[in-house]
Image (spheres, helix red, strand yellow):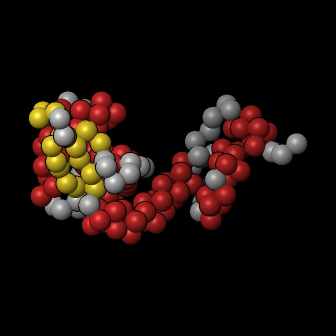
Amino acid sequence: MEQRLRSVVKEKLDVSHDEFLVLCLLAEQGEEGLRMTRIAELLGRPKTRLTYQIACLQHAGLVTRRSVCGDRRGVQVALTDKARDLLREASGNLAGTVKDALACVVGPAQHDALCALMPDLADAPHPAGAPHAEHPDDEHLAEASRPE
């Protein structure tokens, strides 16, 4: 599933998976964005690696960088409108990729449990005859998802 998602991210957004994670994190923020140190902290990335990724995203016109007032070492990063538009346009393809991949790897009981939690997953039927990932908790998950 991860490889499929990486392919869609590269095809639709023309960014690496790690750069996509930065964009997603920034998309959850308001217009003000986040400080680079906080992004590195949240993603568990070294700040030096993040600096390169932010430079690539800035060069592509997807993020802006600015100095933090009162802290000459602080750098604030925010999404551009271009990035927000691209993420919005790509979200359907990305969600479809995840739904299709999940439908192919979970067992029938897990599929039912996931559909109970995420009704949109029901639109991606479990392929007949596809190999199922059998798991001892399949029946337990199915029972837990049934209304009482």
Left or right, residue 66 beside residue 138: left
Q: Is residue 141 left or right of residue 133?
A: right
Residue sitting nearer the eye, 15 or 97: 15
Q: Is residue 11 visible?
A: no
Between residue 15 and residue 126, name the one nearer to us.
15
The image shows residue 130 at horizontal and vertical percentages of: 57, 55
Q: Nearer the viewer, residue 7 or 23?
A: 23
* Quadrant of the snapshot with the C terminus: top right
**In the foreground, 125 or 85:** 85
Residue 58: which quarter of the image?
bottom left
Q: Residue at x 38, y 69 (%)?
A: 89
Give the image quarter of residue 57.
Answer: bottom left
Residue at screen point 11% across, 35% down:
72
Instruction: Determine the residue positioned at 22% across, 55% down.
Output: 63
Estimate the x, y position of residue 40 in percent, counting from the top left: 26, 34
Q: In which image quadrant can residue 9 be found?
A: bottom left
Position of residue 119 measured from the top left corner of the image (x, y, whole percent): 67, 58
Q: Position of residue 117 (x, y in %)?
A: 67, 48
Q: Is residue 79 visible?
A: yes
Identity of the residue drawn at 81% across and 45% down: 146
